Image (tube, rainbow, N blue to C red):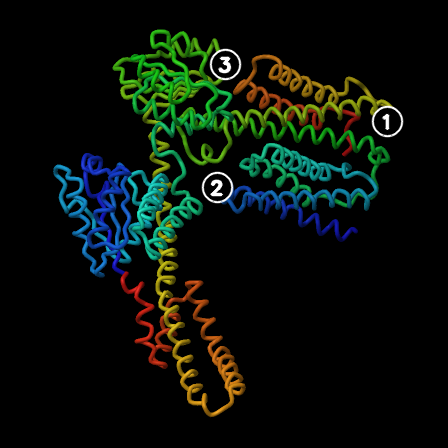
Amino acid sequence: MNLVGISLNHKTSPLELREALHLNREEIISLINRIKSGNFSEGVVISTCNRTELFGFPKDGTIDSDFLIQQLIEFKPVAGIKPEHFNRFFSCGAIKHLFSVASGIDSMVLGDSQILGQVKDAFEISSDLNFSGSISSRIFDTAIKVGRRAIKETTIGEGAVTVSYAAVQVVEKIFANLNKKSALVIGAGETGELAAIHLHDKGIGKIAISNRTISKAEELAAKVHGEIIPFQFLKEHIYNFDIIISATSSENLILTADEIRSAVKKRRGAMMVIMDIAVPRDIDAATREIDGVFYHDMDSLKVIVDQNMQKRREQIPLVEKIIIEEMINFYSWYNALDVVPTIKAMRNFFDDIRMDELNKLKHKISEEDYSKVEDMTKRMIGRLLHNPTVKLREYAETGDNSKEVTTNSLILKELFKLGNNSNNSNQEKETH
Amino acid sequence: MLNTIITINILLPIFYLCSFAVYLYDFLWEKKLLSNAKRIALFLTLLLHLFYLLARTIEYDHPPITSKFEIFSIIAFSICFSYFLLELLTDIRGTGSFILLISLIFQLISSLFVTNNYVVPEVLRNRLLGLHVINALLGYSGITISAVYGLLYMTLYKNIKSNKFGLIFDRLPSLEILERLNYFSAVIGFILLTVAITIGIIWLPAAFPNFSYMDPKLVGTLLVWLVYGYGIIRKTFTDWYGKKVVIFSLVGFVFAIVSLIATNTLAKTFHSFY
């Protein structure tokens, strides 16, 4: 198989290059059209903020990946990008790499499940542009199957692996129903935004944003359907919230332990969760001593992130097992593609003999007798070839035991000298 | 029938052990496949235990409440049954191993030491006594389960407070759910104790000529009932929640155990049959 692939990812290049090379949908379409008019018959372009990958089948059966690299660099010239920033794959290696990407074990955030959707979208673009064939369809269908199996059969995507998500995970261990709780996010920067979005996605009952720059607070509040607490009145409102997540870039403390203590008093002892995910801290660490208050900072949340990452790493062998299983299935199917032309050739071969013998009889017997003999020979050939045909078709359909399929095909070809006849129908596979 | 009873008596601790093992295994390694299997195992154990209790009642012609070890078997059953109901109602399946361990211990002791009681005092054959005892035992099972959830709550509370994010953090439900389970099982226990006390107050004076309202066991049970009643009222109608409720239920449980031990071993009571 002459599938070739190139990959620029977090292992091969710095973030600036990966970001600069990122292709949007329109760019992917243009690039595909460019490759299509070149030497490639089928192909797929996957591009996310962390990786850009190209896979394709060269028309001439070569396995030259340099063409793809050259096309990509020419299409999107990025300062500093070199061929050395790309990994090159071909045939079995390219398929294995694609399956690893789809399953999330090649992602920067191990077990990232978003990549599966991105692989699916990338293949859909190729299909829409008629830049896919039966074999690339099968490869990408299997890749998506690998990704789904990895999610379903392993825990590679489970557990929080970002501090913001870990904060929400702890909150969920304290409160049963987030839809009955209220949360205050202090700081509308990237971390605060992530935390607010996570809480919103988990169905938090009420969310409020407080930020020094009110416009930023408004922007984030609009995203999560929240309200705004003016920063200068923050301290007066904290007792109203079950969850407080603080992620500002303030150099000084925003809330002291005494202020939290007085809020707890006003709450008549109802539990309060405070997540301080700012560096330096926004909230006095002595808060953790207050009864009924769960205070966590970056250090404690990092413990969860590290534990979950370790758990995900332990799942890699299981995902790799799935990849191998699906590669075996794919190659069984691929190898069984030989069978269909062999069956055709075998039936043609027998039919030719039958017709040849019938022609010899044609003028020696009556038309009525000829018709009887013709029917009889048809039935006879049909019965003789029934079992081998069914067996070979079964192998082809199930994709099991590729070795047996290949051996049987070869024996048939050898015994009946079918080689030349089957060549035409085998063309599709040979071009790959 | 006797042979069947003897066989089930041997089988019951094995069934409890198997159920406990499946729940523990699932708690430690969280296998999706075991999620339903463990519930089936528990159901079969309960079914076998129910059959065993009925068989004993028929064979010996009295409810199985005539010896400490028969009572132990009923305690094992009622704890397990109460947990099963709670699991069905809440669909929280991660805490079974902690509860089933108690049932396993009670049933094991019962199976080892229980005897064939054909001859018992006439009063122990009374059906009202059976109802009284079973309600009392189910009531105490309720408060035992409540205490187990209380302990789990405190463990998880301390784990989260001290940044320990291990197995307990991963597997136990949230603090609010544990608090709810703690409260509901205490309420169920309290209701059943109320029924047991009511039956006792109606029936005991007629059954025992030496009955006294100042009987230590009666006073002890009433105090336990009052403690739980106070806690439940505070939780339901005032601002008691979280750790305060859980600690109160644990204190109530310790008080119940001390009261039971004291009235059964130290004090002289008409209320003792073994």
Name the spot of residue A383 as percent of width and height, x first.
50, 78
Q: Is residue A304 above or below residue B48?
A: above
Same chain for the residues under marks 3 and 1 in the image: no
Name the spot of residue A148 as percent of width and height, x first.
41, 46
Q: As rendered, which of A227 and A241 lies closer to the eye?
A: A227
Q: Which residue is mark 2?
A: B28
Residue occupying the point 19% across, 45% down: A72
Mark 2 and mark 3 in contact (Cβ < 8 Å)? no
Name the spot of residue B199 as percent of width and height, x first.
80, 25
Q: As rendered, which of A187 and B164 lies closer to the eye?
A: A187
* Amino acid tagged 2: Leu
Mark 2: few/some/many CA within 10 Å (<14, 14-19, 20+): some
In the displayed image of the protein, which residue is found farthest to the bottom? A364
> Helix, strand, or loop for circle 3?
loop
Label number found at residue B207: 1
When asked about the image quadrant of residue A220, the answer is top left
Mark 3: few/some/many CA within 10 Å (<14, 14-19, 20+): some
Residue occupying the point 66% across, 41% down: B107
Q: Which residue is mark 3?
A: A269
Real-space CA distance between mark 3 and mark 2, rounded to the nearest whole angstrom:
33 Å
Q: Nearer the viewer, mark 2 or mark 1?
A: 2
Mark 1 and mark 2 in contact (Cβ < 8 Å)? no
* Amino acid tagged 1: Ala
